[in-house]
Each structure stands twice: as structure tokens, then as C-alpha cells.
Image (spheres, grey):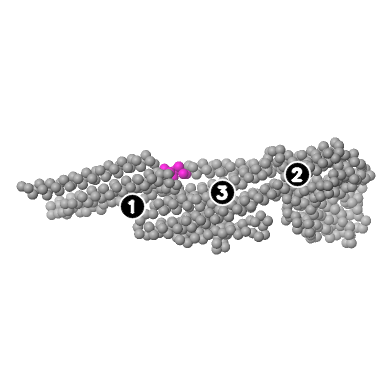
Amino acid sequence: MVSTFFGFTISMKALMAAQKGLEVTAHNIANANTPGYSRQRPELVAGRPIVYPGMNRPGSVPLQLGTGVNVRSIERMRDVYLDHIIRNSTSDSGWFAAKETGFSKLEVTLNEPSESGLSSVITELFNAFADLSNQPELNSERANVREKGINLAETFNMIDSELKSLRADQNRSIIMGVNEINNILHQISDINVQIITIEGIGDKANDLKDARDLLIEQLSAFVNIDTIERDHGEVAVLISGMAVVDKEHVVELATETKLDSSYGNVDVYFENGVRPRITAGELKGFLEMRDETIPAYQDKLNRCASALVNRINHQHRLGYGMDGKSGRSFFRDYNTASLTGTIAFPPGTTLDTPIDELGITSGKFYVQHTEIEITPKDVKPAEAITVGELLEKINQAQPYVRASLVDDYTGIRVQLDLYNPPDVSETIHTHEGSSNFLTAITGVTDAEVVTTETARAYTNAMDMISISLALQDNLDIIAAASEDEFGMYSGAGDNSNALNIAELNDSMNAVEGSSFMDYYNSIIGELGSQAQANYRLTANQEMLLSQLDNQRAQISGVSIDEESLNMIQYQRAFEGAARVSSTLDSMIETIIFGLGSG
């Protein structure tokens, strides 16, 4: 037979369970607005029943007596799979957001369309040459041409500086991101130690796990991560397969500046020297902008600047200034590489020598990856083009390499010179084709490219562009005139070369098979398209994250209305348990005082 006071034990446990429920409810309400907090719930289970003892127990009737309620644990409401999806989505969101910032700065740098944008400045220079053709002798028109040239150069200089600064900004963002990652890793490690201690003695470290999971989610915004939960509730955090947090152990990320980089690029490593494979997060966005997106636009704009300088300079050198002199460039010229054929032409060969007399065959060959064709008509006897015309074909086909004849102690040979290249790393590229011009006739393909001393100070086209030093002090150098039919200076009133330079703006072979405006507009169009595509990705990712957060809130979030109902429920349970205790007390009082008073 159970104790007379057994009912008090049951009611006491009921009181304690209701009290614990009220405490958990109060904790939930108190943290309703706490970031990362997960709603908690007491897990109530019936106590283990006992067999009802006694001699008068019915023999075949099963009979057990419940022992009340127990609070088995306090659980936090969390969906592990949903957490995993949110972390991955947060990494992608960080990646796209970092790129969106970069694209926004790129668009501000190019500032198109606007009156001060590069397209307007390029057009103004060619319009100035067109205006000069109307009155080639006026100093005011010549000064206007020089001013527009300076404005164009300074615009390119400014864009170059801002793009380099933007790449440097990515490096700073990478360093700051790595520092923040390391800070979060140590915080997770510290919490791991506390969780191991608490759960090692059988308790639940719910609030610590919430704090840890919030940190892990913040970490996922910076870099792609994976997590593994261990036996005692601690979590191992992995980046690119490397356990950067495992219990109390932390493997930090480190940055190293490349000494051979003009931009001070930093590489990201684990402190053990292994390079992680970063596939998402803000770090991915910063690295992608620095190493892919910005360099791609730098290259395109440098090619535009290089072609513009070389096309204008080439035509300008063909013209004559007010002083009757030719062969002078409008912009400063930088010869960074040279290649001279190994086979000399016969003595007496000049620019006027027909190429059929030299044994040059029809066909194709390639300079700077550009196809140049010598047609059968070009080598037809009595109709063949001259050496000078063939070299001009090379010069017109691409803007970077100038072909010429040199006559020195080794003989008369073809020389290719690289001028004002897009980047100092650019060199001279030739490739033989079906014509023998570069091979058996000139030996160009067998020659070695020689880097000039000028290349030591050269960086890239946008950075180096400026009007020629002579033009800064002398407007007469501007070559508005061309030679006459006798190859002589045609006079100060001639405007034909100014018109030729102005017409370069409409040339469909100015740069990469396009006009200057078409080429530049394609750059702006591509930037706008990429920025818009990334914006859509960012917006879609934010919408997805919002939906996932709402799903998580339904599971883990605190509803004040729901908690208020729980509070009433536990309050009623507490009152009921107290009433049971009061009733039992009255019964015992009757037994003690009532039965004994007869």
C-alpha cells in the first residue's frame, strides 16, 4: 500500500512542472526581440508508474498507479535542415551584395551617360579636329584641339586611377573580412567550450547554442561554410573542408600581400599555409571583383585608350604642321617592344618597291592576332602593291604595332614596333599563315621580341596617355595639312589631314573591328547588363532569405499571443495542482482529527 502522503508527491511535481512552464514562458517573452533566440518548450512526460501493492489486489486485473509528471528537459525549437539552407543562402546573398557594391562603384566611375563621360570627351576631340578643318590656320581652333586632347587624356587618367583604387578597395575589404571571420571563429570556439561543460553534466545549453548559431550565420555571410555537431553539442566549422573550429581549437585565416602586384593584391590562406577554395560569401564577391570583373574592364578601356592614341598618332604623323614638318605625334608615344626580321631585302629595296619583285606570295598572315591578307591582285605583276602599301596594311589592320623598313649594317629589313600598348605586359605577336611574308621573305617569325628601355617606366595606356611634350608649348605642331601630289607640304591652309583625323571617329576598324564609339558603348552596355543581372540575383536572394526567415520564425520565433495562452495554461495547471494539495490536506486532517475523536 502506498504512503498516505503519495498524493502530495504527485501534486508537488505538478506544481513544479507548472512553475517550470511559467518560467520558460517568461523567458520566451523576455527574449521575443532577441536576435537569434529560439523559442523554448518544457518537455513534460508522465512519471514512471508503480504497481499497486496489497493483499486485496484483484488477481487478473492489471493495475498500476501513476506517479505524476516530470520535466524531462527544456528543448529549443529549431529545424537543423532549414538552418543549413539559410546559411547557404546567406553565403550567396553576401557574394551578390559584395558584387553589387562593386558594380555600383564601376558605374559611378564611368559616369555614363553624362556630359563629362568618356564618350562625350572622345566625341569632343574629334569634333574639335572637324572644326579645325574649317579654319586650319586659326590658333583658337588649334588651342581648342589641344584643350580637348588634354581633357581626353585627363579623363582616361582619372578613370585609370579610380579603377586601381577600386581594386585596392577590394583588397582592404578582403583584409577586413578575414579579420572579422577570425574574430567570429574565436567567439564560436569560446562558446563551444562552455557548451561542452554544460552539456557534459547533462544540462541543456540552449541559449549558448542560439548565440553560437547566430555567429555561424554571420560567418556564412563572409564565406562558404559547413558545420558538424559533435557528441556534447559543440560544433565543428569547416571552410573548404578545413576544420577552422573544432571544440576549442581554431585555425585562423591569414592574408598575404603579393609583392609582385602593382595593386598590392592580397591572397587568403589558412594559417597552416593551405589556400581555401572560396565559393560564396562576401570574400568571393570581393575576390571576383578584384581578379575578374574590374581587370576585364581595365583591359577593355586600356585597349580603347591604346587604339585611340595609336590611330590618332599614326594619322597625325602623316600630316604637316604649320611649320611644314611631319612625322610628329599628337599624344606622347611610348615604344615598349621591337621585333626585327632576320632576313634582309635585296639592296636598294624601298617603300616604293613592288612586292612581286621580292617574291612575296599572296595569302594570309597575322600580327597581334589580326588577320592580314595579301590578295592575288596585290602580287600581280605590273599591278602589285608596294612595300610601303603592304606595311600600311599592317598598320591599318590593328592599332598597336607599327611596321616599317629599317636600313642598318645588316641590311634592309622589316621591323615591327609596339607602341602605347594596353598594358606593359603586352608584347608583339606574329603568326605565319599561307603567305610567305613573315617567314621566308622577312624572317619575322624567327626573330625575338626585344623589350625597350621605355617599357621600364610604362604601366598601361590609360595611365600614360598625355599630349606630346612639344604640343604643350607649340600649337603649330598640330598636323592639319597633308602632302600634295608631289609629296610636299601643301600649305597652312590645307585641312585634309584634320579631316582624316576627324573621320577616324567613324572608322569601323578603329579598335577590335569596331568604331571607337561602338567599342566604348559595348563596354558600357556590358557593364549595365552585368550590373542589372547581379541586381536581380541580389533581389531574388534577399526575397528567398526573407521567405526562409519567415519559415524559421514559424518554428523558432516567439509569438506573444501563443506565449500568453501558454501562460494561462500553466497558471491553471498550477492552480489545479494547488487545489489537489489543499484537498489532500483536508482529507488527512479528517483522518487525523475526525477518526480519532469518537
Give the residue type that dot 1 points to. Answer: Ser
User: Which quadrant of the rendered structure holds the N terminus?
Assistant: bottom left
Q: For the residues labelled 1 and 2, say whether their Cβ atoms are less than 8 Å apart.
A: no
Say whether marks 1 and 3 touch (CB < 8 Å): no
- Residue 407 higher or lower than 498, as above or below: below
| Residue at (70% x, 49% y) in the render | 160
| Numbered disc 3: secondary structure | helix
**Secondary structure beneath disc 1?**
strand
Viewer-side residue, 260 vs 83: 260
- Dot 1 or dot 3: first in sequence order is 1
Q: Which residues are magenta?
A: 548-554
Q: For this rendering, which residue is in front, 386 or 453?
A: 453
Label disc, if present, on residue 95 of the rendered structure: 3
- Mark carried by residue 73: 1
- In front: 221, or 469? 469
Mostly what secondary structure, the magenta segment?
helix
x, y percentage for residue 353?
A: 91, 51
The image shows residue 592 at horizontal and vertical percentages of 12, 49
3D distance between C-alphas at marks 1 and 3? 40 Å
**Residue 96: x %, y % from top left:** 57, 46
Q: Is the residue marked by circle 2 packed among few (<14), some (14-19), or many (20+) residues within 10 Å?
A: many
Label 1 crowd (10 A; few <14 / some 14-19 / many >=20) = some
Q: Nearer the viewer, mark 1 or mark 2?
A: 2
Q: Is residue 393 visible?
A: no
Furthest residue toward left: 598
State the CA–CA distance, disc 1 to disc 2: 74 Å
The amino acid on which the numbered mark 3 sits, given as a three-letter code, is: Trp
Judge the density around disc 3: few (<14), some (14-19), many (≥20) Cα neighbours within 10 Å. Answer: many
Three-letter amino acid code of the residue under disc 2: Leu
Above-or-below relation of 138 to 92 = above
